[in-house]
Structure formats: C-alpha cells, structure tokens
Image: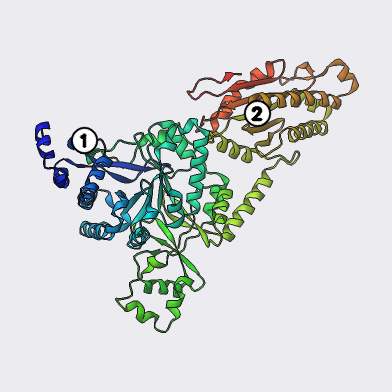
Amino acid sequence: MSAAELLALRRFGDGEIVTLAKLVIETAFQPIVEAATGSVFGYESLMRGFDRLGFQSPLDLIDRAHDAGQLMALEHMVNSRAIAAFAALPDFRARTLFINLDSRLVSEGSVLVDRLAGHLQRAGIPASSICFEISERFDNDTLPDFALLVRKLRLAGFKLAIDDFGVGHNGLKLLCDHPVDYLKIDRHFISGMEADARKRHLVRHTVNAAHVLGTRVIAEGVETEAEFIACRDAGCDLVQGWFISRPVTDFSALSPVYPQVDRAGGIRRNSRTLDSILIRREIEQVAVLRENESLESVFECFRRDPKRTFFPVLNANDEPRGILHEYHVKELSYHPFGRDLLKNKLYQKGLSHFVTTAPIADLDTPAEQLLDVFTGMGGNECVILTERMRYAGILSASSLLKIINEKRLKTAEDQNPLTGLPGNRSIRDYLQDKALDGDQLRCLCYFDFDNFKPFNDHYGFHKGDTALSLFASLLRREFVGDDAFIGHVGGDDFFAGVSGRPVADVRVILERLLADFSREVRLCYSPEDQLAGEIRGHDRAGQAARFPLMRCSAVVLVVPEGEIISDAGQISSLIATLKADAKGSEAGLVLASTSAHGEPPAAL
C-alpha cells in the first residue's frame, strides 16, 4: 500500500481505526525462553504495522482507539488473529501465548474473555495455554470490576502475568492480592544489570519473593549476553528480548530452541551439587489433580488415599497451579446434600474455586533457599518442585528437614579430621556458588606450604600435624564473618574465600597471616636448626640437600564485581598457573585479577 493510499485511508477519521488496522496491522511473536536451557516456553503477541497508520508505537494506536470508543473492537481483532496464528504453529500445544490485556477494558473484560474462549475452543487450545498480561501502566485499584475479572480469568483456567513490574502504579499490590502466574520485570531493571549491584540486588530479591508466592519470573528486554547471564544467575525463570530474538512476523523463522542461551557465559557445569542430589532423592511423587476435573473426581482421590490431606493441582500444560486441601471441600463431601448440589447445574463452582497457591521452586534450588521459600509463608503444606517449568513432585516439611540434616552430616563427614575445616566437597560447592555470583568482588585464596615435606620427614608426622593445626588456627583467627569461608584442601594445601572486602584489606590480612605463620612455625624446629635457618634432608630424587625453614605461599585470584565465571574449574586452572610465581617471590604472595576475555590473570 502506497503512502498516498494510506493518507487517503486516514481521512476516514478515528471512527474507522479498526477498519484501517485490519488492512495493515500484522501479528508478531517474540519468543520467551527458559533461562536454563534456551527452549521456547511461549510467545508474546505484539502488533506490527502501526507505523503505516502514522502512529509512533502500539500504545499510541491503542490510546487513539480508546478515545474513539473502538478499543474493544481493536483488542478483539488483534487477539483473535494472534490466537489463529498461534494455533497454526506446529508446537502450539506445548507453548503459552502471552496476550496483553488493556486495563481500560476491565468493565467489558467478561465479554472479551467469552469471545476469546470461543476462538480457543474452535482451535482446540486449552485456556491454560493463554496468559493475559496486565500492565502496571494504569492504576487497576481504581477499577471496581478488576478483582472480579481476575477471578473470572483464573477460574476459567487462563494464566495471568504482571507486565512492566517495578515501574508502574501497583505491581506489588497486584502480586500480593491476586494469584499471579508470572511476573515480568521491566527492562529498566534489566538494562546494564550486570554492572549495577543495586539492580542485581533488587532483581534477586524480587525473584525470591515471587517464588515464595508460587509465581515465576520473566526478565523482559534482555538485549546482551551479559544481561542474560546476570538474569539467569539472579534466578529468573524465563527471559525475553533481542538477545533471544526480535519479534517476527514470519513464523517459519521461529525456533524451538535458541542455542545462544546454552552457550552464554561459556561451558556451564553439569555436575549436580550435594543439595540437588539429596532433593532428588527425597522428592515425593503423588497423584495430581487437573484444574478442569470435576469435584466428584476429587472426592474419589481422597477416598483412594485417605491418609493424603492434599493434592497438587496442575493445568493442561503440566504447570502447577497450587494445591487442593481436603478441608476446602470437606463441607461438600460430608454434607448430606453435597453430592446433589454438585449435580445441580446452578452450582457453578468447580475444582479451580478451591485451589490455593503454594510456593514453587526448581529442583536445583539450594536446600537452605528451599527452607526460606517454605517458611516464607507460614502454613504451607509443601513446596512444589518443577523441572524445566513443569511439575516434578513435592517436598514436605519433614522431607526438607531430612535433607538439611543429611546435608549437615555430609558436610561434617567432609571436614578434615585433623583441622576440623571443611574439605573438598564444601570448597567445590563454595567455588561454584561464588563463580556465578557477580554481586560482589571476590578474593579466592589458595595456600601451600614451602618445604613441608622435608620438615615432616625430618621431625615426623606429629610435628607436621602441629604445623597444619597451627595454620588452621591462624586462618580461623584472620577470616571471621559471614563474608568469609575457609577450608582444608588436604595435606599442606588450604583455601580461603572472601566476598565484598576491598583487595587492599585482604592483602593486609594475608601479609599478617603469612608473617605470623613463618614466625610461629619456627618454634617447631630445634634451636640448632632455627639458628642455621635450614635443615638437612633429601629431595624428591633422594639426593642430600639443604632446605630453608618452612613458610607458606599464597595465591589470590581476585574476581571483580560483575564478572561471572561459568565453569568453576577455570578457577583452579588459573590458580595453578600462579603457584610457581608465589613460591618464587620474596614475600610468598601473588595477587592477580581474572579477565573476562580469556586472557591470563593480570598481577595486582
């Protein structure tokens, strides 16, 4: 259509907005993918072609339609086209379509929903495959029918998302007052998040709060790999933005998986943590209910399993919707006319009327964080666990406590019997955690004694154990606080990690630690050897040699704030390249900063 033809069409005026829109507006889909895998979870439906009508954005067109009294007609046209396009996708049954719902249509929302439900029924799309996005753009509190519409959508099986969370009127109130399935964090908080500790802090705490409420989190407007990694590490479940894909009108260009997600940040560790292993061992597989089932089938479930007091409830896409507890339906079950009431067509309540929300967490969530989720809202029956956003099982309070206790036992078993410090498993878990946590600067310190073997051979293992215990006590004295971790790798190798402290402060601690050890360990030698400053012994080839008195060398790998190391094994490799420098230096201390571009560590 030429510019002249469009200009002629525009002369029809605001009364013909929908007529004009039908000619030029196209449906575009933007993929929303799982942060852990890059697999497509769903698509947001967007408008394209609004510029051909002279509008700067879709919002300008929508606002003009509202002013002209044609908003309902425009929304219906746009959404019905989106549903038709969605139904034509080969994999639509495994996806979710996100549709924007303008709050100004709340008073007519029931009509809009009923119309769309008809389209869905004809296309064979379950209501749980549609998620309505409610924007914070308008103050929904001023709309008296808003709560009724939200309840109607929920009971019909539709999913709900809060759009533009954090920059609008009342997102927190929406999240608090309504059972929301998804929360879409606005681009404002995502932009440059990898370099802004305040944004990372806010996003991480938003994610934690949402998960306690059984809500999953979508990061909107993710444009760079660095932003994506920061969102993934903050716990966002899903991501959307140009880093994944721009909105497309050619649906053949859509992909089921976006490999740049899996490649982001290099090779990620595949080994499961102790927490993950214990959680998978304790996960409970129980019978589930579907939200479209009849209440009669609910009673049958409770009859078959009389000891079970609740059942998880899933939608048609295997996503958890909450739990149904027996006391929610007990009155109907035991009432003499309860069954007759259910058969009465005037009784409109179904299973979804009795579902209550429950906290949701991924299978790979750390045990302590699961405990926080569980206790975040008192009275929870369980935590619903998911894998790749789909239901995986439940974890009860007793199972969670069992996991915590077993983890503590395993941690105790991992402690070095001589020094009582955490061993290799704990050190590995600490490194995996800190490698992916870019919120603070991290100093990762590796300690290795110089000339320990000749000392141990000359004086015996009892004296060697004394030296090891001495160093462990010095570590405990110097590294105190929640921001510090110390461990015993084995033999004369130790580890310490510190988060958030300035490098200069860490250097002072290490210089004092190494000096104190060198001074105090001298007392383990005989007066003659102390005076000589060396001992006689044999080197590894069995040749007679002289060895200086023992000291400790230290390598400190400084990981700057905002930097992520996807493979924690790289830390050990980087430290190994610096050990010889530390042993060869006069002070026995080398500090080096990591590089985000794969270059050798730079000395500080």
Which disc is residue 445 wearing? Answer: 2
The mark nearer the N terminus, 1 or 2, is: 1
- Dot 1 falls on a residue whose secondary structure is helix
Q: Residue shown at 28%/41% (left/top)? A: 59
Q: Amino acid at mark 1?
A: Asp
Q: Nearer the viewer, residue 558 or 71?
A: 71
User: Where's the C terminus, which quadrant?
Assistant: top right
Q: Dot 1 surroundings within 10 Å: few (below 14), some, or many (20 or more)?
A: some
Which disc is residue 42 wearing? Answer: none
63 versus 596 height, above or below: below
Q: Nearer the viewer, residue 73 or 128?
A: 73
Name which quarter of the figure residue 142 lies in.
bottom left
Task: Give how far apart the Cα atoms at labels 1 and 2 are.
Answer: 57 Å
Q: Amino acid at mark 2?
A: Cys
Label 1, on which residue?
51
Q: Residue furthest right?
A: 527
Residue 361 visible, this angle: no
Q: Dot 2 surroundings within 10 Å: few (below 14), some, or many (20 or more)?
A: many
